[in-house]
Amino acid sequence: MTMESPVGGETIDSLVGAADPLEPGSAVSWAASPAAEAILRRVLAEPLIAARPRVSGALVAVGFAAALALASGTVVAAVHLLGGPAPPQVTRDLSAVDQGMPGDLRYNPDVSHARLVAVAGTSSMYAADLAGGGYCGELVVQGRAAGAICVTALSLAAHPVQVSVPFSEPITPRSPVTVGGRVTLPAATAVVLRYADGGIDRASLTSGYYVIEVTAPHLGSVHAADFSLRVVDAAGSTLEELTVPAVMEEAPPPSNSIDATTISDSSDFTKVLGVDGHVPASATSLVLRFPDGRDLQVRLQPDHSFHLDIPADLQRAFAVRPGLLVARDAAGDIIATQAIESVAAARAAGM
């Protein structure tokens, strides 16, 4: 591995712009795209394993943005008394949301008062309050904890409709689907799901929280097509409506992109220990550009895969600002880029 100086004074911004120029206003639409979700999937990591969940995960729509909750996959005994205490596994998951995070990026949920806030069938939702507003919550679906998520007061103010859709792989047309979350619109009384097949499911809000189990006749529809979520008042008038993506297997990355996964250790999420993945077939070189402009050459394998262990003294380089993987072809032209950042930096961007 060799460190190189920036070529021709190129910056990370200029490299991104050259490889993938954006039209005015497209950043907003991109934030709601599957690509935005994919980047978050690649950043988040379990201890010393690839960042993308291999078995289970949860698609979390925050207004029109996307985030990921890593699922604990642990079976939890059913408790259906609203306001009752969260079971031990849920409190452990909620307590773990700050593991490896610096003090200024911790949510500090009030886990001792975590409670059951909504129930539907075999699904339930638990929540713990954050100081100053916001909450950390976890859905339990068919007795299995689906992963804790946290939403700050600032995020709630910007996105008053929160939607979580946990899933377990492999996803089939008959896989159960549960939708849950929180609504903070003052006049809201219920949430209505309308599917592409014309069917609907509905749930009343309990202190702003809700859980809906998609009924069996509509499972095929939610696995094949996007569906809408409407928040309504007591008169049935729509207060807000958003689109929830179809619950299906994640599409493979485009062949002309860099498919990268960061490697992190939950003891310190300000660090990026390494990165691996694949580059386009036409790529002949790959560098990891650090936020300070230095480059680290990444060795490519014959099958276009790569793996890089980042030197210990550079692992915190992405704690605050992202770096960039830059792939070039034989002519030296940039053919693909991919942002790289620490889990802590990703959290800071979303707080």
Image: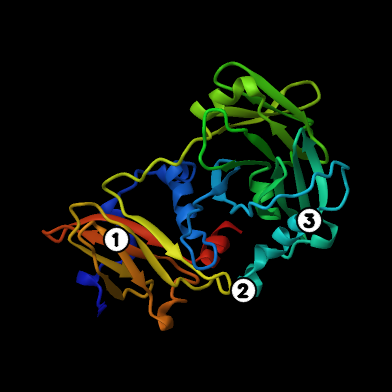
Image spot of residue 124 (x, y percent): 76, 41
Image spot of residue 59 (x, y percent): 56, 44
**Which is more N-terminal, label 1 or label 3?**
1
Residue at x-position 53% and y-position 49% = 55
From the viewer's perspective, tell me whether residue 292 is left or right of residue 303. right
Residue 129 image label? 3
Which residue position holds label 1?
14
Q: Residues within 10 Å of mark 3 (few under 14, many from 20)?
A: many
**Which is more N-terminal, label 2 or label 1?**
1
Q: Looking at the image, can residue 225 be seen?
A: no
Colour basis: rainbow
Please name which of the two marks, 3 or 1, marks the residue nearer to the observer.
3
Please name whichever residue, 50 or 342, is drawn nearer the observer in this view of the structure: 50
Image spot of residue 31 (x, y percent): 48, 46
Q: Is residue 322 above or below residue 232?
A: below
Please name which of the two marks, 1 or 2, marks the residue nearer to the observer.
2
Question: Does the residue at mark 3 contact the one at mark 2 (Cβ under 8 Å)?
Answer: no
Badge 2 element? loop
Alpha carbon of mark 3 to alpha carbon of mark 2: how far? 20 Å
Q: Looking at the image, can residue 69 be seen?
A: yes
Q: Residues within 10 Å of mark 1 (few under 14, many from 20)?
A: few
Q: Residues within 10 Å of mark 2 (few under 14, many from 20)?
A: few
Q: Quadrant of residue 70?
A: bottom right
Alpha carbon of mark 1 to alpha carbon of mark 2: how far? 31 Å
Question: In the rendered image, which quarter contains the N terminus?
Answer: bottom left
Q: Is residue 170 above or below residue 92?
A: above
The amino acid pointed to by label 2 is Pro
Which residue position holds label 2?
102
From the viewer's perspective, tell me whether residue 224 is left or right of residue 194. left
All told, the count of numbered labels is 3
